C-alpha cells in the first residue's frame, strides 16, 4: 500500500512508538499537513492532545533539520482543515503575519503562549485594538507573548498597549527592527504613563541606554528578569535616575555590539544598582582613553562586589584602549589571567594585543565555556579555543589578517555562518600553504570594508573552500578586480553558489556576469 503522501508499507508497519519518534524529529506542521487523514491510525497518533500542544506556522523542518517557510497552499490547508480540529488542545502557537487571519474567530481555550512574527505596525495594532481574537487572548489568558515587528515611530504605543492588555502576562519578548536613522531618540518613555504590570521577565531590543533606564525606573514593578540588547550606549539624552537600588531584579543580560566609551560612566553605575542580582550576562565592546583593560580586578572590585547574591556570571568584553599618557602600563595576557585567578576564577579566556607604537591596544576577556553566538575578533594574536556556539563573527583590526589566522578561525569556530571583515591593510604573507582552508557552514560573507586581498583569500578556491556560500557583501570595484571582470576561473566555483549579492555602487552587469552568478 502506498499513500498519496509517499508513505509506503514499511513505514505504516512501524509500531506506534517508532512512528512517534519520527514525528518528533519533524516540525509539527509537516506531520499535520502530511499525515492527517492518511488513515485512522495516523489520525489517532497525530491528533493526540499530548502531541499537538505546540504549533509553529512559520516554517517546516525536514529530518535533516533543514527549515523552509510554508507556502500559501500549506498554510491554507492547515488553517482550514487542521486548526478547527485541534485548536482546543493548543498551548503554544507561533503565527507569521501572513497567517494571522487563519486564527481569528477560533477559541483557543488552552493557549498560554503566543508568538506573532514579522508584523507590520499597523496590522499588529489592528489585532490589538477592538474586540479581536488576539486582544481577547492577551486580555484573558496569555502568559507568554513574543512579538516581532518592523520599526515605526509609534513603537512605544504598541509596547504600552501590550502591557495594558496583558492582564496575565508574565513573560514578554518584544523584538523590533530599526535603522540607524532612529538612533537619535530612545524607543520608549514609560515615565509619563503609569503601568500596573504582572510582567516578571522581559526580553527586548532597544536603540539607546535611555530605554534600559526607563524600563528599570520602577514602572514594571514585578520585573525580576531583563534581557536587553542596546543598539548604542551613549550618555542618556534625558535626566533619568541611575542610582536607585534595583531590589527585585534577579537576572540581567546586557548585549551591545557597537563600541561605547560610556562603560565606566553609565554601565558600571547601572550594574552597581543590582544588589540582589543572581544571574548576570554582559556582551560589550568598550573603548577607553588614558586607562587600561577591563580585567578581573576591576570586575570584582568595582562591579561584582556590589552583588552579594550573584552565582552566575557570563561575559564577553572587548576593551580597546587609546592612550595619550605614555606612562600607563598595559597589562599582559598573563596579568589578565592572574587578575581572575587571584579572585578564584580560573574559567576565563583572554587575548591581548599591546600596540605600544600606536599607544593603544586590545584585550578580550570571556567566561568559559564561551556561551554567545557572536564573537568580535579584534586581536590578531588569537591562538584558539572552543567556540562551538558562535555563528556570527566580526574581525576588525589595523594589522593584516594572514592566512594562518583564517586557518585557526576555521578550526576553532566550526559552525560559523556569518563573517564580516573590516581591514584595509594588505596581507604580508601571500605565499599560502598548500592546505585548503574550509569553512563548512559559512553562508554569508561581508568584505565591503576589506581590501582586495581578503576577497582573494575567500573567493579563490585555491585558498578557501565555502561549500555553503550563499550571500556576499562586497564593493563592485573589488569584485571586478578579483574576478578579472568575471573571467578569472579561480573565483568561479565559490561565486557560482551565491544566491544574494549586495553591492552598494550602481553598476551594469557585463556579459560574463551571469556565468559567475547563475543563481542570481
Image (spheres, rainbow, N blue to C red):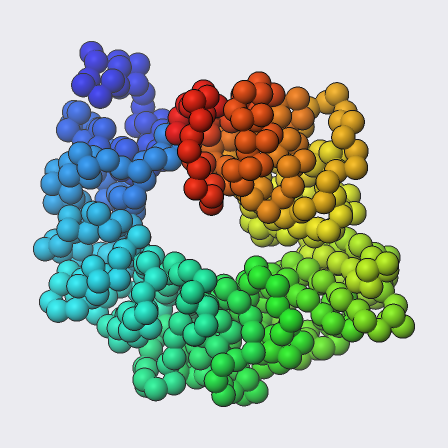
Where does residue 329 sit, x and y in percent of width and height? 88, 68
Residue 216 lies, in percent from the top left, at: 47, 79
Q: Quadrant of residue 123?
A: bottom left
Determine whether, in the image, residue 112 is placed left or right of residue 504: left
At a point 17% along the width and 34% down the height, the residue shown is 73
Is residue 199 at all visible to an observer of this figure? yes
Find residue 271 and report its image quarter. Answer: bottom right
- Image quarter hosting the C terminus: top left
Taking 448 as reference, is 68 left or right? left
Horizontal and vertical percent position of residue 214 = 44, 79
Q: Is residue 357 left or right of residue 22?
A: right
How many dots with numbers? 0
Quadrant in which the N terminus is drawn:
top left
Q: In front: 434, or 307?
A: 434
Residue 257, percent from left and from top: 57, 59
Please determine whether, in this image, residue 251 is positioned above or below residue 507: below
Judged from this view, the residue extending furthest toward the top is 1
**Considering only vertical position in the picture, is 160 above or below 472?**
below
Residue for point 13% across, 63% down: 132
> Which residue is at the front of the view, 489 or 102?
489
At 27% from the left edge and 55% from the top edge, which residue is drawn? Answer: 119
Residue at (52% x, 38% y) in the render = 476
Is the residue 119 above or below the residue 191 in the image? above
Q: Is residue 65 visible?
A: no
* Nearest the eye: 114 or 284: 284
Amino acid at each position: 500500500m502506498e499513500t498519496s503522501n509517499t508513505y509506503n508499507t514499511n513505514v505504516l508497519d512501524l509500531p506506534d512508538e517508532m512512528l512517534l519518534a519520527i514525528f518528533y524529529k519533524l516540525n509539527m506542521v509537516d506531520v499535520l499537513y502530511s499525515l492527517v487523514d492518511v488513515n485512522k491510525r495516523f489520525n489517532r497518533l497525530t491528533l493526540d492532545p499530548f502531541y499537538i500542544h505546540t504549533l509553529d506556522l512559520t516554517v517546516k523542518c525536514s529530518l535533516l533539520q533543514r527549515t523552509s517557510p510554508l507556502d500559501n497552499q500549506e498554510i491554507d490547508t492547515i488553517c482550514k482543515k487542521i486548526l478547527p480540529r485541534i485548536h482546543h488542545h493548543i498551548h503554544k502557537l507561533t503565527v507569521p503575519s501572513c497567517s494571522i487571519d487563519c486564527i481569528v474567530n477560533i477559541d483557543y481555550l488552552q493557549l498560554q503562549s503566543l508568538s506573532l512574527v514579522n508584523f507590520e505596525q499597523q496590522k499588529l495594532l489592528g489585532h490589538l485594538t477592538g474586540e479581536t481574537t488576539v486582544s481577547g487572548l492577551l486580555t484573558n489568558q496569555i502568559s507568554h507573548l513574543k512579538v516581532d515587528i518592523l520599526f515605526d515611530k509609534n513603537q512605544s504605543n504598541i509596547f504600552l498597549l501590550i502591557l495594558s492588555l496583558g492582564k496575565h502576562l508574565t513573560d514578554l519578548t518584544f523584538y523590533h527592527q530599526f535603522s540607524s536613522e532612529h538612533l537619535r531618540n530612545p524607543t520608549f518613555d514609560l515615565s509619563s504613563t503609569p503601568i500596573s504590570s504582572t510582567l516578571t521577565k522581559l526580553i527586548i531590543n532597544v536603540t539607546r541606554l535611555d530605554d534600559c533606564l526607563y524600563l528599570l525606573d520602577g514602572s514594571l514593578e514585578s520585573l525580576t528578569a531583563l534581557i536587553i540588547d542596546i543598539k548604542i550606549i551613549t550618555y542618556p539624552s534625558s535626566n533619568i535616575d541611575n542610582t536607585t537600588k534595583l531590589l527585585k531584579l534577579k537576572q540581567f543580560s546586557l548585549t551591545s555590539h557597537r563600541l561605547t566609551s560610556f562603560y565606566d560612566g553609565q554601565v558600571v553605575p547601572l550594574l552597581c544598582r543590582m544588589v540582589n542580582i543572581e544571574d548576570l550576562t554582559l556582551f560589550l565592546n568598550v573603548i577607553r582613553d588614558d586607562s587600561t583593560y577591563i580585567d578581573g580586578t576591576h570586575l570584582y572590585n568595582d562591579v561584582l562586589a556590589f552583588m552579594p547574591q550573584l552565582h552566575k556570571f557570563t561575559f564577553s568584553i572587548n576593551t580597546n584602549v587609546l592612550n595619550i599618557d605614555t606612562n600607563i602600563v598595559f597589562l599582559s595576557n598573563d596579568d589578565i589571567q592572574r587578575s581572575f585567578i587571584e579572585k578564584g576564577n580560573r574559567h576565563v579566556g583572554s587575548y591581548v594585543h599591546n600596540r605600544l607604537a600606536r599607544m593603544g591596544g586590545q584585550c578580550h576577556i570571556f567566561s568559559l565555556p564561551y556561551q554567545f553566538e557572536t564573537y568580535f575578533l579584534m586581536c590578531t594574536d588569537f591562538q584558539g579555543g572552543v567556540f562551538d556556539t558562535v555563528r556570527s563573527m566580526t574581525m576588525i583590526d589595523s594589522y593584516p589578517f594572514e592566512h594562518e589566522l583564517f586557518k585557526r578561525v576555521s578550526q576553532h569556530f566550526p559552525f560559523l555562518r556569518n563573517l564580516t571583515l573590516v581591514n584595509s591593510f594588505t596581507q604580508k604573507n601571500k605565499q599560502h600553504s598548500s592546505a585548503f582552508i574550509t569553512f563548512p557552514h559559512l553562508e554569508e560573507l561581508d568584505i565591503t570594508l576589506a581590501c582586495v586581498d581578503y576577497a582573494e583569500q575567500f573567493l579563490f578556491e585555491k585558498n578557501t573552500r565555502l561549500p555553503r556560500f550563499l550571500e556576499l557583501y562586497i564593493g563592485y570595484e573589488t569584485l571586478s578586480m578579483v574576478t578579472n571582470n568575471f573571467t578569472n576561473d579561480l573565483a568561479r566555483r565559490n561565486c557560482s553558489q551565491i544566491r544574494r549579492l549586495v553591492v552598494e555602487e550602481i553598476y551594469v552587469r557585463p556579459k560574463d556576469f551571469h556565468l559567475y552568478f547563475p543563481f542570481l
